[in-house]
Image (spheres, rainbow, N blue to C red):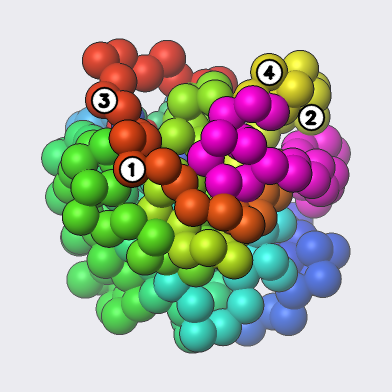
Amino acid sequence: MTAYEMLASGLQQLGLSVNPQAVEKLLQFSDLLLEKNKVMNLTAVTDPKEVVTRHFLDCAALASHIGSGKTVLDVGTGAGFPGIPLAILCPGTQFTLLDAQRKRIDFLKEVVEELSLSNVMPVHARAEEFAALHRASFDLAVSRAVADLRVLVELTLPMVKKGGMFYAMKAADCMDEVGSASQAFAILGAPAAELLRYIVPHDGVERVLVRLQKTGDTPDKYPRRFKKIQTDPL
Ligand code: SAM
């Protein structure tokens, strides 16, 4: 099976409609990613078919939760995950892709230009700094492989509007992590976590979307500034 066929059938398995132009754009992004990965550290994945499963189809599982006409913030987007695949699959929604590493944001600016992604804005900033200027500004926040949930919700929820959602993409065995963060969820205005399980097509790996609805305000003192954030494994 070619990467194109894997991607198209995987999107179908996730219940998404398959737009051939979107599939082509995703594969173009894969080429740009693997090419740039030769000269800078963007991803541990080097096989184009693994880019399809571990990056694109994993991130695409979130697409059906995004909807159209929304504003979405991807915190710690790195090489553009989940933000770029979601922006390609949800062209009617505006994506802000945030990362503390300038080189990764420079790469994403090149991607935006090459793929003519008019609904993507890459931003170089730490979430703690960006939050000071963009409180309660986004309908949705998303994040994958950035930090433990207790830290992650402090970095993201201040920027989500009341009534909005935060989706954290996590490993299947994240229940203890979710349990340990329950107090942080309540303090930051999103007390109830839902766990949505999915299987990544053509990979068979089970993953979880931790969904938090923001029902209250986040107190002004959050986020605090973190010195060093322990990266969450994929
Ligand atoms: N989300 C991507 C993915 O799933 O492939 C990248 C994950 S990478 C392991 C974690 C990223 O989070 C890094 O690019 C890092 O620069 C970024 N990051 C960590 N702490 C951050 C912060 N406080 N503000 C913005 N970005 C941050």
Looking at the rendered structure, the kind of residue marked 1 is Asp
Label 2: element kind: loop
User: What label sits on residue 180 in the rendered view?
Assistant: 4
Within-10-Å neighbours for mark 2: few <14, some 14–19, many 20+: some
Give the mark toward the camera: 2 or 4: 4
Side of 38 relative to 209 (left or right): left
Q: Which residue is mark 2?
A: 172
Sequence order check: which comes first, mark 3 or mark 4? 4
Give the mark toward the camera: 1 or 4: 1
What residue do we see at 50% from left, 85% from top? 69
Label 4: element kind: helix
User: What label sits on residue 220 in the rendered view?
Assistant: 1
> What range of the chain is rendered magenta?
182-209
Q: CA distance from mark 3 to mark 4?
A: 20 Å
Side of 65 relative to 141 (left or right): right
Sequence order check: which comes first, mark 1 or mark 3? 1
User: What label sits on residue 225 in the rendered view?
Assistant: 3
Within-10-Å neighbours for mark 3: few <14, some 14–19, many 20+: few
